Image (tube, grey):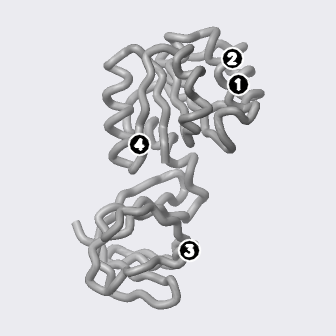
Amino acid sequence: MKALLISDDESIVTPLDSYLKNHQFDTIIYKWLIKALDNIEEIKPDLIVISAAEYPRHWKTLVQFVKSGIGGDNVKIFLYEPSPLSDEDKLKAKKLQVSYFATLEETDLKKLIISFFPEGNILFNHPKTNAVYSAKLFRKDDKRIQFKSDFRIPEIKINDYINHLTLCINDKCEIIKGKVISHTNEVITLEVQD
């Protein structure tokens, strides 16, 4: 998945970039909004994060441009604004179906990831190819997690190690890693490891 970050402030870009890369996003960073607008059609991001404080009037133009379909389908857009949004901007964000967050703490940054996960859904990397697959949760306890892949997974075997699986339940996301202990009919059981 691709994330487009629009900000000239390194204190914003650095933690966002790091967090998103740790959650398997390829990040593209633009310091200037106009340049991002110019290239958005080629980038086709899945996620856009824009600093509303740096672009208080122009973020609305960017959102309308993306929502026209030029930037891709189902692009999730978030505003980063450490000061509370005005009532007027909150209303505009709601009408434009844009979310926002106010801190760079993990509790707020999780909103970016959760937006891609319906409850109980999973994204994980193939242990050999690193391709990203989606799955539905069947069962979970402290030692094991069992899930069914949405697609056929080639070349996955017992004892393969999945080092990045993201699971979201009730607005809480966690990263799990572990060893495949069974794999039948696209149902995978993973022995969770620390």
Which amino acid is tagged 2? Answer: Thr
Report crowding for label 3: few under 14, some 14 to 19, many 20 or more residues within 10 A (C-alpha): few
Q: Could you tell me which secondary element the residue under label 3 belongs to? A: loop
Q: Residue at x 50, y 19 (%)?
A: 51
Q: Residue at x 49, y 58 (%)?
A: 168
In which quadrant is the C terminus drawn? bottom left
Q: First in sequence: mark 4 or mark 3?
A: 4
Q: First in sequence: mark 3 or mark 2?
A: 2
Q: Residue at x 50, y 83 (%)?
A: 186
Q: Which residue is mark 1?
A: 65
Q: Which residue is mark 3?
A: 151
Q: Could you tell me which secondary element the residue under label 4 belongs to? A: strand
Q: Could you tell me which secondary element the residue under label 1 belongs to? A: helix
Q: Residue 146, position in %: x, y?
A: 45, 79
Which amino acid is tagged 4? Answer: Asp
Q: CA distance from mark 1 to mark 4?
A: 22 Å
Above or below, comparing residue 127 to residue 30 in the picture: below
Report crowding for label 2: few under 14, some 14 to 19, many 20 or more residues within 10 A (C-alpha): few
Q: CA distance from mark 4 to mark 2?
A: 24 Å
Q: Residue at x 53, y 78 (%)?
A: 152
Q: Are marks 2 and 1 in contact (CB under 8 Å)?
A: yes
Q: First in sequence: mark 1 or mark 3?
A: 1
